[in-house]
Image: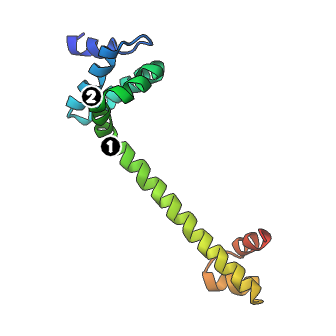
Amino acid sequence: MAKENQKWLTLLSSHLNKDDAKRIILQMGNLTEKDEKAYANSVVQVAVTENQKLFDLMKGENEMACEALLELMKPEIDELLRKNTEIVEKRGEEKKQNELILKCLDKNRTMEEIADLFGIPLEEVKAVAAQR
């Protein structure tokens, strides 16, 4: 086994010290290949899970290591932010639509008229009306 791979395997331990933890973060920052990053990410996940207290302690002590880890995780963080933004926007649109449906009901529009007006199934209008 290549010496470089052995270094990564030594990090699969529940007894890492600060030097090992720093090394794992700094090594991750030096990776450039997508496959390398994916494999290393698996090792990091195990290391962090098994050594949570150590990594929590290091968060406050080593700003450079935190920045390196954030940079490494940037694509995943950006994807989570994008998905959460979509969810929040969708919920906001649903809330607005539900409010409009309730206003239509208050103005004595039939559920069938409302479903046709919004282009949604009658069941959705009934579900909103049931929440009153």
Instruction: Give the quadrant of residue 30.
Output: top left
What's the colour scheme? rainbow
- Name the spot of residue 122 as percent of width and height, x first: 72, 76
- Name the spot of residue 119 as percent of width and height, x first: 61, 80
Badge number at residue 28: 2
Quadrant location, the N terminus: top left
Q: Is residue 88 above or below residue 20?
A: below
Numbered disc 2: secondary structure: helix
Badge number at residue 25: none
Numbered disc 1: secondary structure: helix
Query: Dot 1: within a 10 Å radius of its alpha carbon, few (fewer than 14), some, or many (20 or more) residues?
Result: few
Q: Earlier in the sequence, mark 2 or mark 1?
A: 2
Q: Is residue 6 above or below residue 68?
A: above
Q: Which residue is drawn at the image coordinates 50% and 65% (left, top)?
A: 89
Q: Judge from the rendering whether residue 67 lies leftward or rightward of residue 113; answer left or right.
A: left
Q: Which residue is drawn at the image coordinates 29% and 21% (left, top)?
A: 22
- Name the spot of residue 21 as percent of width and height, x first: 33, 19
Amino acid of disc 1: Lys
- Name the spot of residue 16 as percent of width and height, x first: 38, 13
Q: Judge from the rendering whether residue 71 lies leftward or rightward of residue 114; answer left or right.
A: left
Q: Judge from the rendering whether residue 102 lies leftward or rightward of residue 44; answer left or right.
A: right
Q: Which residue is drawn at the image coordinates 37% and 43% (left, top)?
A: 76
Amino acid of disc 2: Met
Badge number at residue 74: 1
Mark pair 2, 1: CA separation: 13 Å
Q: Judge from the rendering whether residue 14 lies leftward or rightward of residue 90; answer left or right.
A: left
